[in-house]
Image: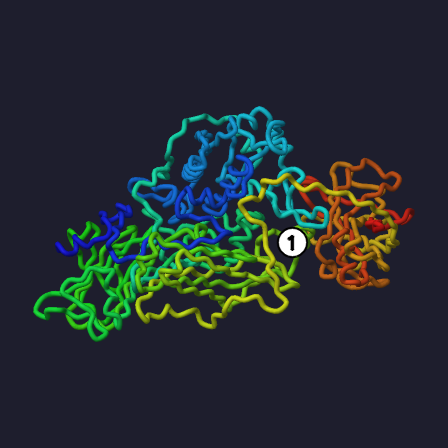
C-alpha cells in the first residue's frame, strides 16, 4: 500500500465528489496531449476559448456576438446538471452542455469575465437573464431564448450597438420593428436580413432569433419587468471558479482516448435523473440557424435520443502491448513484471497486482476489465486508502466520478489485458472539421515525456454533399440546415498521423473537398483518437472500409462561413437592377368543382367542413420564357368582381400536374403543391373587376430552368380561420376582362 501511495499521480476523491486532482511530473505519462483545429473553438480553457473565437473580431459588439454564437454550439436547454460543490464553466462545457436559463447565463457571464467584460443578472418572472457591460453601456444577450436586438448609436461602428433591456423597455419598437417573422420557417430575423437571396447570393450570415418558440411579446414584457439582482459568480450550480478542474488529457504508453461524436445507448450521467439528457425541442433550435445548424445538421436522425443535441461518449482504453517489457511503466506494480509476453508475479509465493489510474476531464459512466487471466478487480476513490471488490465486466461504482484506481489481482500469468472506461462529454466542445482546408495542431506540455514512444492522432469522419444550392433553399423557403437535399457517405474517411517527440508541436492539414457540381456541408464526424504507442506497437484498427483523405478529380475545397462571426456584419444591401415587364397570355378556361361539373357563374368556393371545392382553370402555356437567371418576378392577375361581405378570403394558385384539355375533369391529385396565395378583401356587393396578383415567380423560374411548358394553373379558395373567421367563403371571377401573366425580366447591361 505504501508503494501505491508513493506512486499515485493524482489525488483521489470520494465517490461523487467529482473533482479532478493534479498529476505529478514523474508518473511516466505524456501530459496535456492537445488537439485543436483552426476552424473549431479551443475548449482547453476559458482563455483559449475566447482567444480562438474572437481572434478576428474588430469591436466589442463583435466579441460579444462571437461568444453568443459559441453558446449556440456549446449548449442547449434542458434541466440543470448537478454535482456536489457545483460545476465550473469549463466542466459544464466539456462534460454536459445543457442547462436551463440561469445555468446557461452563469456560463455565459463566465466567458464575458474572461473576455474582460462586466456582467449583471436580471431576474424576470420565471426567467433568469444576464447583461454584459462594454464600451460604457449594458447589452442584453439571451442564449436560452436565443435573442438580442440592435439600437442606433452614432458613436459605434456601423452606427449601431446591441441594446440593453432598459433600451427595449423604453422603446419596444427595437423588437417589434427591428425583428421580422418568417411565417414559413416560424423564426424571426432582423429587419432587412434573413435567409433570402440578395444580389444573386443567399444571405447566410444572418442571425435567427426566438427559434425555440419564445415570442416578441414575451421578450418585451420581460425587459419591462426585469429586476437587477447583482453580479454573482455562480447561478444554479454553474460557477465561474474552475477550482481544481482541468481539461488536461494525460496518457501513458498503451493508453488511448477515443472521443466519439455519437451517443452510446444508456451510457450517460445526470445525477438524480432517470431519463437521458436531450434537447426536447427536437431540431428546431438549429435547423434554421446558420451558426449551429451546419455544424449539427450531419447528425439529424443518426444517433440516440433523436440525434443531435444530446450527450456523447468517449472510450478510454489501457491495452498494454505485453511483448514490450516497458508496457506497464505508467501503472503501479506490486510484485509483478512483464516477461515472455505476460504479466507474472516476481515472487510466486506472494500476492501480485497492478494498479491502473483512471483520470480524465470527462465524467466516467462505466468501466470493465477484459481479461480471462485477471484474478479479481478492486476500485478505490480515496487515493488508495481503501479498495472495494467489483465485477470485472461491470464496474458500475465508477459512474459519476472523474478519477479512480483499479487494482487488478495477478495470480496466473496474464497474457492479455484491456481496461476500458466509457465517459460522457459534450459533442459541441469537440474539435470538429469543416468543409475546406483544416489546420490541425498537436501539442503536449513537454514532448520529451514521449521518450522513445510515439503519439498517434486519428480523425475519422464521413464526407457529405448537398445537391441544391443555398440560393435554391432560400428561394423555395427551405430550412438552412435540416439535411434537405444532403447526404453523407457510409464509407469513413480516416486521417492518421504518428509523431515522435522531436516532431512536437506539430501541424498537419485535412482537406474536406466537395464535388464541383455539388455544394458543401460539414462532414459527419465519427471520432478523434489519441494513442501513446510503445516500441513496435501498432495503432488500433481503423474502421472497416476506411479510405484516405484526398482531393479527387472534379472536386474543390468549397467552404461555409466561419460560424462565430455570423451576425457581426451589416445586412447586405440589395443593388437594384433595371427590369422590363412583359405580358404573357393566360386564358380563363372555366370553373369546375371536384366532381367535374362546370359552373358558368364563375364563383370559386371551398366548404371548410366538407370535401367539396371549386377551382378556376387557367391555360398558360408560357412559351419563349427568358433564361432563368433573367427572371426577376412573375405574377398571375385574376379579375375578381365579388367576395364575401363579412370576411376576407385566402386564395391560392396551384400548378396542374397534367396538361389542361378541353372538357377534362379535375381532382385533387391533378393539382400540385401551393405556389403562393393572396388575401382578397371582403366586399359588400358585386362591382367592376378588381385585379389581384398571385406570385408565381418560383413556378416560372422552374419552367425556365427545365425549359418545359406549363400544364396550366388552378386557382382555389383556401379555408383559413385566421383570415375568414370560419365562414364558408367564395370569390367571383369574370371572363369579361382578361386574365393575364406579367413577367419582370432583368435588362442586360452593356459591358
- Quadrant of the snapshot with the N terminus: bottom left
Instruction: Tell me which corner region of the image, top left, top right, bottom left or bottom right, holds residue 700.
Output: bottom right
Q: Is residue 726 left or right of residue 96?
A: right
- Asked if residue 353 lies left or right of residue 526, the reply is left
Q: Is residue 33 above or below residue 729?
A: below
Q: Residue at x 46, y 46 (%)?
A: 74
The residue beneath circle 1 is: 470
**Residue visible at 84% across and 37% down?**
685
**How many numbered callouts?**
1
Q: Residue furthest top?
A: 170
Looking at the image, which is closer to me, 267 or 510? 510
10 Å neighbourhood of mark 1: few (<14), some, or many (≥20)? many
The part of the image, by quadrant, that contains residue 454 is bottom left
At a point 81% along the width and 43% down the height, the residue shown is 692
Residue 747 location (% of width, % of height): 84, 49
- Whether residue 97 is situated above or below residue 508 in the rendered picture: above
- Where in the figure is residue 653, as x and y percent of width and height? 76, 51
Residue 527, relative to residue 93: is it above or below? below
Q: Secondary structure at mark 1?
A: helix
Q: Position of residue 554 (x, y in %)?
A: 63, 67
Amino acid at each position: 500500500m505504501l508503494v501505491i501511495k508513493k506512486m499515485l499521480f493524482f489525488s483521489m476523491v470520494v465517490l461523487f465528489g467529482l473533482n479532478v486532482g493534479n498529476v505529478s511530473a514523474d508518473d511516466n505519462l505524456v501530459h496535456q496531449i492537445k488537439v485543436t483545429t483552426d476552424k473549431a473553438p479551443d475548449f482547453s480553457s476559458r482563455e483559449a476559448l475566447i482567444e480562438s473565437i474572437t481572434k478576428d473580431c474588430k469591436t466589442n459588439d463583435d466579441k460579444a456576438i462571437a461568444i453568443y454564437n459559441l453558446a449556440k454550439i456549446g449548449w442547449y436547454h434542458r434541466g440543470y446538471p448537478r454535482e456536489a460543490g457545483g460545476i465550473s464553466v469549463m466542466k459544464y462545457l466539456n462534460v454536459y452542455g445543457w442547462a436551463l436559463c440561469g445555468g446557461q447565463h452563469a456560463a455565459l457571464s463566465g466567458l464575458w469575465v474572461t473576455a474582460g467584460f462586466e456582467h449583471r443578472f436580471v431576474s424576470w418572472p420565471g426567467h433568469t437573464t444576464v447583461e454584459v457591460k462594454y464600451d460604457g453601456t449594458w447589452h442584453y444577450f439571451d442564449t436560452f431564448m436565443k435573442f438580442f436586438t440592435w439600437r442606433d448609436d452614432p458613436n459605434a461602428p456601423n452606427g449601431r450597438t446591441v441594446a440593453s433591456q432598459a433600451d427595449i423597455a423604453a422603446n419596444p419598437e427595437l423588437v417589434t420593428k427591428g425583428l421580422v417573422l418568417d411565417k414559413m420557417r416560424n423564426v424571426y430575423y432582423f429587419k432587412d436580413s434573413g435567409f433570402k437571396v440578395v444580389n444573386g447570393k443567399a444571405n447566410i450570415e444572418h442571425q435567427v432569433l426566438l427559434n425555440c418558440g419564445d415570442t416578441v411579446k414575451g421578450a418585451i414584457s420581460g425587459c419591462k419587468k426585469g429586476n437587477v439582482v447583482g453580479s454573482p459568480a455562480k447561478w444554479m450550480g454553474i460557477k465561474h471558479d474552475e477550482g481544481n478542474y482541468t481539461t488536461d488529457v494525460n496518457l501513458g504508453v498503451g493508453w488511448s482516448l477515443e472521443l466519439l461524436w455519437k451517443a452510446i445507448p444508456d451510457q450517460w450521467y445526470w445525477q438524480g435523473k432517470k431519463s437521458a439528457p436531450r434537447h426536447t425541442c427536437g431540431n428546431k433550435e438549429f435547423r434554421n440557424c446558420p451558426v449551429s445548424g451546419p455544424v449539427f445538421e450531419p447528425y439529424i436522425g443518426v444517433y440516440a435520443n433523436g440525434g443531435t443535441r444530446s450527450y456523447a461518449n468517449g472510450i478510454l482504453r489501457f491495452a498494454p502491448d505485453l511483448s514490450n517489457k516497458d508496457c506497464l511503466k505508467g501503472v503501479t506494480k506490486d510484485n509483478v513484471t512483464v516477461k515472455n509476453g505476460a504479466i507474472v508475479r516476481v515472487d510466486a509465493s506472494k500476492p501480485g497486482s497492478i494498479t491502473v489510474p483512471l483520470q480524465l476531464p470527462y465524467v466516467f459512466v462505466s468501466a470493465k476489465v477484459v481479461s480471462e487471466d485477471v484474478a479479481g478487480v478492486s476500485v478505490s476513490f480515496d487515493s488508495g486508502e481503501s479498495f472495494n471488490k467489483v465485477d470485472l465486466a461491470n464496474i458500475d461504482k465508477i459512474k459519476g466520478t472523474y478519477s479512480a484506481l483499479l487494482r487488478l489481482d495477478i495470480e496466473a500469468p496474464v497474457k492479455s489485458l484491456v481496461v476500458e472506461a466509457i465517459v460522457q462529454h459534450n459533442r459541441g466542445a469537440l474539435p470538429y472539421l469543416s468543409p475546406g482546408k483544416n489546420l490541425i495542431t498537436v501539442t503536449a506540455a513537454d514532448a520529451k515525456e514521449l521518450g522513445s514512444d510515439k503519439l498517434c492522432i486519428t480523425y475519422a469522419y464521413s464526407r457529405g454533399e448537398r445537391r441544391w444550392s443555398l440560393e435554391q433553399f432560400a428561394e423555395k423557403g427551405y430550412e438552412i440546415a435540416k439535411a434537405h437535399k444532403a447526404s453523407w457517405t457510409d464509407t469513413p474517411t480516416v486521417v492518421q498521423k504518428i509523431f515522435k517527440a522531436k516532431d512536437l508541436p506539430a501541424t498537419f492539414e485535412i482537406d474536406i473537398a466537395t464535388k464541383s457540381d455539388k455544394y458543401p456541408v460539414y462532414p459527419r464526424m465519427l471520432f478523434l483518437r489519441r494513442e501513446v504507442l510503445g516500441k513496435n506497437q501498432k495503432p488500433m484498427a481503423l474502421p472497416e472500409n476506411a479510405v484516405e483523405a484526398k482531393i479527387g478529380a472534379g472536386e474543390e475545397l468549397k467552404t461555409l462561413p466561419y460560424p462565430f462571426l455570423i451576425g457581426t456584419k451589416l445586412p447586405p444591401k440589395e443593388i437594384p437592377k433595371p427590369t422590363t415587364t412583359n405580358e404573357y397570355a393566360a386564358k380563363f378556361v372555366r370553373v369546375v368543382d371536384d366532381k367535374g361539373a362546370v359552373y358558368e357563374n364563375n364563383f370559386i368556393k371551398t366548404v371548410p367542413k366538407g370535401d367539396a371545392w371549386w377551382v378556376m382553370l387557367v391555360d398558360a402555356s408560357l412559351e419563349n420564357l427568358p433564361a432563368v437567371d433573367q427572371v426577376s418576378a412573375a405574377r398571375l392577375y385574376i379579375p375578381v368582381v365579388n367576395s364575401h361581405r363579412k370576411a376576407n378570403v385566402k386564395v391560392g394558385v396551384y400548378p396542374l400536374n397534367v396538361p389542361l384539355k378541353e372538357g377534362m375533369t379535375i381532382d385533387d391529385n391533378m393539382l400540385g403543391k401551393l405556389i403562393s396565395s393572396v388575401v382578397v378583401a371582403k366586399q359588400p356587393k358585386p362591382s367592376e373587376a378588381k385585379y389581384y396578383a398571385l406570385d408565381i415567380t418560383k413556378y416560372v423560374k422552374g419552367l425556365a430552368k427545365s425549359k418545359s411548358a406549363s400544364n396550366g394553373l388552378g386557382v382555389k379558395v383556401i379555408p383559413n380561420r385566421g383570415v375568414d373567421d370560419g365562414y364558408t367563403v367564395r370569390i367571383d371571377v369574370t371572363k369579361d376582362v382578361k386574365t393575364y401573366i406579367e413577367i419582370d425580366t432583368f435588362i442586360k447591361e452593356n459591358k
